Amino acid sequence: MYHYDAKTALEELSEDATLPNPVHVRDMMLRRHLSVGQSLELNRLFVEYQKFFGEAQKLGKEILKQLAG
């Protein structure tokens, strides 16, 4: 289960093409002791990840609605 382990999440992404929920990614970031620079850079990347994750969910939902209907 990847919820709080970045290494496991990366392995699962490689194996199952499953992206971790942004909430869990944020938890992973908060559990690490990062420098200010690392924290800023990861936060910038995280905001993009969160945006695209939400867009992918919307698209997936629309596809599934049409397939189910």
Image (cartoon, rainbow, N blue to C red):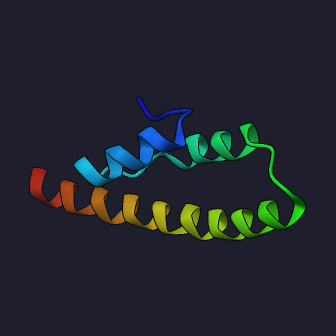
Residue at 34% across / 51% down in the picture?
13
Name the residue nearer the viewer: 47 or 7: 7
Name the residue nearer the viewer: 54 or 25: 25
Residue 65, quarter of the rendered image: bottom left
Is residue 69 something that shows in the picture? Answer: no
User: What is the x, y in percent for residue 36?
Assistant: 89, 61
Residue 64, quarter of the rendered image: bottom left
Residue 30, quarter of the rendered image: top right
Residue at 57% across / 61% down in the picture?
50
Location of the N terminus (image quadrant): top left
Report whether 10 appears left or right of 32: left
Query: In the orientation shown, which residue stands out farthest toward the right?
Result: 36
Name the residue nearer the viewer: 46 or 12: 12
Vertical side of 2 occupied by 60: above or below: below
Residue at 55% across / 65% down in the picture?
49
User: What is the x, y in percent for residue 35?
Assistant: 86, 57
Report whether 53 appears left or right of 30: left
Residue at 29% across / 54% down in the picture?
14
User: What is the x, y in percent for residue 3?
Assistant: 51, 33
Q: How many marks?
A: 0
Query: In the orientation shown, which residue stands out farthest toward the top?
Result: 1
Report whether 5 appears left or right of 29: left
Is residue 27 something that shows in the picture? Answer: yes
Vertical side of 59 occupied by 61: above or below: above
User: What is the x, y in percent for residue 16?
Assistant: 24, 48
Vertical side of 10 occupied by 8: above or below: above
